[in-house]
Image (cartoon, rainbow, N blue to C red):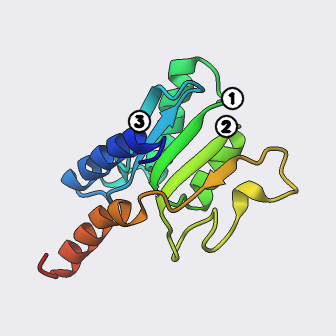
Amino acid sequence: MTRWDAAFDRALVEAYAASAHGDVPIGAVLLDQAGNIVAVGHNERELTGDPTAHAEVLALRRGAAAVGEWRLTGHTLVVTLEPCTMCAGALVLARVERVVFGAYDPKAGAIASLFDVVRDPRLNHRPEVIGGIRADECAAPLHEFFDGQRGVPS
C-alpha cells in the first residue's frame, strides 16, 4: 500500500479507457498539494489525430485550466508509464513538483530509462521523481494492448 494507490487506481482506469478507442493504454492523474484529483488524462492520439495528445500533456492542460494557472507548483503527476521526452519537458515547463510513475519505458522513457530530462541540472526546474510504483500492474494494460496488436493470445 502506497500513498499513491488511489491515484494509480484512477490512472489505470484512464489507461484502459485509452485502449477502448485504440490508443496506447497510458493514464495520468494530476493531484494538488492535498492529494486531491485536479485533472485526469489518457492517450488520445488515435481518437483526436493529435500527436501531442499524450496522457500527461492532457492531464497538465486540463489541470492548468482547472487551476487557472499554467504553473502547477505543488502538484504531483501520477502516470502509469515513464514519460517520454515531450511529456518530461512539459512537466518541467509546468513546474510540477513531483512525477510518480509505474512502469519503466526502456524504449522511450525520458525520466530514467533513456534520458533524465527532468533532473538535468541545467534546467530551471527539476521535479522530484518516484518510479516503479505498481510497475507490473501498470505494465499489464500495455502488454495486453501490444499482444493484441501482434495477434498474441492473452
Residue 6, compared with residue 69, is above or below; it is below
Q: How far apart are the two marked residues, 2 and 1, measured between alpha carbons?
A: 5 Å
Which residue, given by chain and number where applicable, does mark 3 sit on?
A: 40
Choose the circle earlier in sequence order: 3 or 1. 3
Residue 94 is marked as: 2
Q: Position of residue 144 (x, y in %)?
A: 23, 69
Residue 23, compared with residue 94, is above or below; it is below
Give me the residue at 25% from left, 67% from top. Answer: 145
Residue 23, compared with residue 126, is above or below; it is below
Q: Is residue 152 left or right of residue 98?
A: left
Choose the circle earlier in sequence order: 3 or 2. 3
Q: Position of residue 57 (x, y in %)?
A: 51, 44
Residue 71 is marked as: 1
Determine the secondary structure under disc 1.
loop
Residue 21 visible within the image: yes
Q: How far apart are the two marked residues, 3 and 2, measured between alpha carbons?
A: 15 Å
Badge 3 crowding class, 10 Å Cα cut-off, few under 14, some 14 to 19, many 20 or more, is: many
Residue type at tag 2: Ala
Determine the secondary structure under disc 3.
strand
Residue type at tag 3: Val
Give me the residue at 44% from left, 30% from top. Answer: 39
Determine contact: label 2, label 1, CB under 8 Å. yes
Determine contact: label 3, label 1, CB under 8 Å. no
Choose the circle earlier in sequence order: 2 or 1. 1
